[in-house]
Amino acid sequence: MYSTEQHLLPPSISQIVRWMWRWSVCPVAVSRGYMPFCSTQQKPHQANPSPISQVTHRPGNQLTLCSLLKMGFSETQAKEMHEGATKSRGKHVHSVLTALLLLGLNPSSILKIMQKCPEVYSLKGADLQQRIDHLRKMGLVEGVSLSVPLFPGSLQRMISRYPKVMLLPVKRVNMVSRLLREKCLFTIHQATDILRDSPEVLEQDLSKLEYKFQYAYFRMGVRQPEMVKAKLFRLSLSELRCRHCFLEQRGLYQTPDKKGQTLILNPPLKDILCVSEETYLVQVAMADADEFHVFRKLMAREQEEEGREDEYSSDEELEEDKDDDEDDDGLHRRKRHWNTGYKKDRK
């Protein structure tokens, strides 16, 4: 037996338009939160329908199991999708699903997106479409549908891997993109590749994001094209420092001089970052796991002490600024007193 979920083809645009129209002619009975799959029985005509019934059967106002089946979801998928939509109480689920279908995502991919990020149920279709259009303008395109898994489009791949990108406002995306281009000096194409391959950067602190770039650029001597190729921003800063310093301690990595030259041949950044810890230890560091774990603990303790020192120094700076402010206030008060006394003496 073949699974119907594995052989579902993405719907065409004309099919989606027909589904949107058919939602109004396929009313589904609602009873205690349970909705049958596809009921085409017409209710008796009411002379004066109540406002509640008008809202219930208003076209496009409610997502039904029948409409989900016609959109290409299997029975199991439709049940799960409808259950999630009911729990979220989203009022625009059908417009959200339509936008994702028009993007070229198939029902299986859409269901996985909703499982990863249920907040998408609560989005407004117009807001989602605006964010998708903005990502398109930044160079992320659909490409081939995800029904062909080997050749997904960059925009589809980004949304499928990190659905939270649909929740972020356009302003936030612009801020991160501007930081990558202006502070880190990535080209527009490189910045687009980073957002596609490492969309997590959209939620990271901008100062920490810039510091990670500076560490790789100045401390490791890595240039922008190699950072993009190695997917630098997928790894945390602590893991990046740990792997780099461990190689450095073992004499397997050296910071290049001003001319970019080293006395040894440094391993490529992708061989350090884009592999599992086991592969990194065997093929790059040539060390055992126990030694690396001890080094990691020492690095964590050192970073903790550095954090305390930074916190202590920042507190001292705040106290100095406070003392300076108090001295300034006292000086202003004396000046006001002198001015007032001077006026009295003149009288």
Image: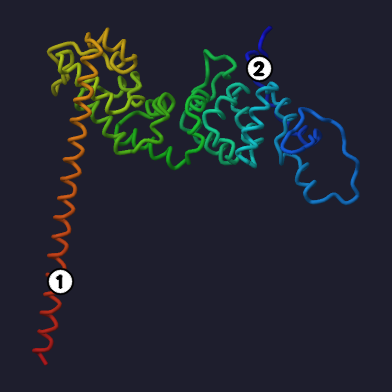
Residue at which label 1 appears: 332
- On residue 204, the disc is none
Q: Earlier in the sequence, mark 1 or mark 2?
A: 2
Check the image and tell me how it is coloured: rainbow
Q: Classify 10 Å Cα crowding around label 2: few (below 14), some (14-19), many (20 and above).
A: some
Q: Judge left or right: residue 322 versus residue 282.
A: left
Quadrant housing residue 302? top left
| Closer-to-camera residue (294/342) | 294
Q: Which residue was labeled with disc 2?
A: 9
Which residue appears at 55% of the width and 27% of the height?
113
Farthest bottom residue in view: 347
Q: Nearer the viewer, residue 281 or 201?
A: 281
Residue at 32% from the left image edge and 27% from the top image edge: 236
**Mark 1 belongs to which amino acid?**
His
**Image: 72 above or below 337:** above
Residue 270 vs residue 59: left or right? Answer: left
Report how far apart the C-alphas of labels 1 and 2 lie in the structure: 77 Å
Q: What kind of element bears circle 2? A: loop
The picture quadrant where one finds residue 182 is top left
Q: Residues within 10 Å of mark 1 (few under 14, many from 20)?
A: few
SS type, badge 1: helix
Indicate whether 250 appears above or below 346. above
Name the residue at 22% across, 20% down: 244
